[in-house]
Amino acid sequence: MAELIVKHLKYSFIGLWRRGILPLTLLLSGCISNPPPNLPDTWIPRSTPLADSDIEDGEIPKIHIFIMYGKLIPLHTALRVYSPELGAVFWDPEGGYGKKKKGPKAKRVKDVVVDPVPTVKDYLKFREVNPTQKTEVFEFHVDVEIANKLIRMLTPENDGEIIAYETDVEGPFCSSSISKFLTKHSDQTVQTPKVCLPQTFSKYLYQQNPDRVIIADDDIYIEYGPGPEAQSPSTSF
């Protein structure tokens, strides 16, 4: 009985979101505001605008988490995992990459973009033709074994329709789906409580000691990191 109630509430939530009622209600109630990135005051630019070569994959296995902001509300969360051994996988829960008339064409299998898999640059260019004001890109360097495990969990088997992890997402659950996946399977690289909104996920990601954060504003990409006065962030929830 409890499971039926939870399922009913979930689909009611999805219906309200898709009709635009829930986002408007949250906006008017102050639950969602015009959100600049949650950049800590003690973080500073590490560079002048980055060149394309500065965001290429290279030889370091890594996790990239994209948090997108619009003019009034946070928009979306997406995940990219890269390994020099297996390449990359891109999970775009209920996202639009490869589906919109404007932007690149790509094959999607259960919300995983498989052909071609977008690079960091590809995805940021795609966001430029969408109503995106700013994008935070959280980069975490990981052991190759961790990256390989995550990639295998998200990659369709034999280019088919079977994926080890349940990647199909309905409604506004992109942030909660990705945070749940990484908290459970990234070997403590990313450990966050349950989140619903992208800006809440962003707040906790700054506490996870990312190797760098790239803030994209149109086609200008700036790398940020803790300044000399920054203290180790608290990870208590």
Image (tube, rainbow, N blue to C red):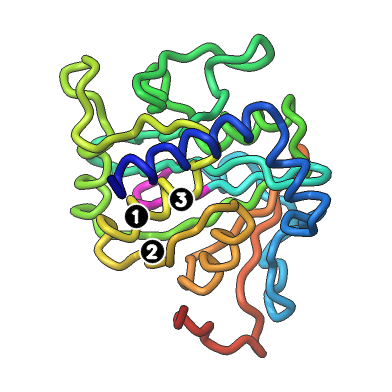
The picture quadrant where one finds residue 76 is: top right
Q: Identify residue type, mark 3.
A: Ser
Q: Which residue is mark 3?
A: 176
Q: At x 53% / y 53%, what residue is drawn?
A: 196
Which marked residue is nearer to the observer: mark 1 or mark 3?
3
Q: Earlier in the sequence, mark 1 or mark 2?
A: 1
Q: Secondary structure at mark 3?
A: helix
For residue 33, above or below residue 92: below
Distance between the alpha carbons at the discs numbered 2 and 3: 13 Å
Question: Is residue 63 on the magenta stretch?
Answer: yes
**Label 3 neighbourhood size at 10 Å, few (<14), some (14-19), many (20+)?**
many
Residue type beneath disc 2: Val
- Looking at the picture, does residue 185 appear above or below residue 159? below
Disc 1 + disc 2, Cβ < 8 Å? yes
Tell me the element at label 2: loop
Mark closer to the observer (2, 3): 3
Image quadrant holding the N terminus, namely top left
- Determine which residue is flagged by label 2: 190
Q: Residue at x 83, y 51 (%)?
A: 28
Q: Using a 10 Å C-alpha cutoff, classify the residue at mark 1 as few (fewer than 14 neighbours), some (14 to 19) or many (20 or more).
A: some
